[in-house]
Image (spheres, grey):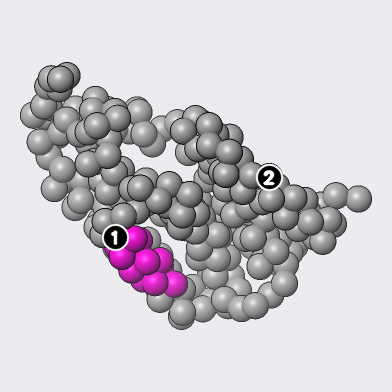
Amino acid sequence: METVALSKSLGNDIYAYLQTRLLMPRIAALGTLVLLAAWCHSVPQSLPPHWGHALIDMLLAALLLAQFRIWDDLADVPIDRRVDPNRTLCTTLHRKAFQLIVIGLATTAAGLLVSTADPAAPGLLGGLTLLMVCWYWFPPRSSWSGLNYHVVLLKYPAFILLIDSRRAPLSGDTTILQTIVGVYLLLCVFEVCHDRMLRQRTRFRLVAGVEACLLLCVAFTTGLLP
């Protein structure tokens, strides 16, 4: 059995976590995708009116991505202890400090949403948080790989709606709904392509194939493809 050294320095743990789990090309790409989806679904109405609004949008996206990334990893610690025991949150003695960081990020994000065009936006963030609390608490989730990634990826369409709510009320607007469905399907397909364990299972490849076809349908419907 592998012995893993426990880290005693909170500063070193935060730095290591940033380097290995947050400051990564994949996270930057996710943030860019979320922002572009929020800004470009109904040009020019959906664009930030000036650079100050764009900076706040980027700050909100960064807060949401960081909050849920850390939370995901905290929830996965029991699994990671078996499959990847050297991850920072498996070796740190300061897990409660990371939990407080999540609370701080969530509070700041909620504060940014208080002055949005739609007063229901903080409620959407609260609903997303409640969904994730229930899902992370649900004991069988670790064995339900397919359902697990489909539930966890729901946060990204919610991020898009939250950023968009800073300029327009949350509504059933067709363009934003098509956009968030397209982003969700794209991320579901990517998850199977990226995760070796999912990719090795035939049923997940079939599901990803169906989702890729649905993604093409959404692209045709929105006019992204001729």
- The percent position of residue 101, horizontal first and vertical second, equals 23, 50
| Tag of residue 138 | 1
Q: Report the span colored magenta.
A: 124-135
Quarter holding the N terminus is top left
20 drawn magenta: no
- The percent position of residue 27, horizontal first and vertical second, equals 48, 38
Residue 12 falls in which quadrant of the image? Answer: top left
- The percent position of residue 6, horizontal first and vertical second, equals 11, 27
| Residue type marked 2 | Gly
**Residue 151 appears in view:** yes
| Residue type marked 1 | Phe
- The percent position of residue 49, horizontal first and vertical second, equals 64, 62
Q: Crowdedness of circle 1 by 10 Å Cα count: few (<14), some, many (20+)?
A: few
Residue that badge 2 annotates: 209
Image point (29%, 30%), residue name: 83
- Whichever of callouts 1 and 2 sits on the residue coming sooner in the sequence is 1
Image point (54%, 70%), residue name: 165
Prevailing secondary structure of the magenta residues? helix
Image point (27%, 53%), residue name: 102
**Residue 36 appears in view:** no
Q: Residue pushed farthest right?
A: 226
| Tag of residue 51 | none
Q: Is residue 25 above or below residue 139?
A: above
Instruction: Kindly state the secondary structure of the residue where label 2 is placed.
Output: helix
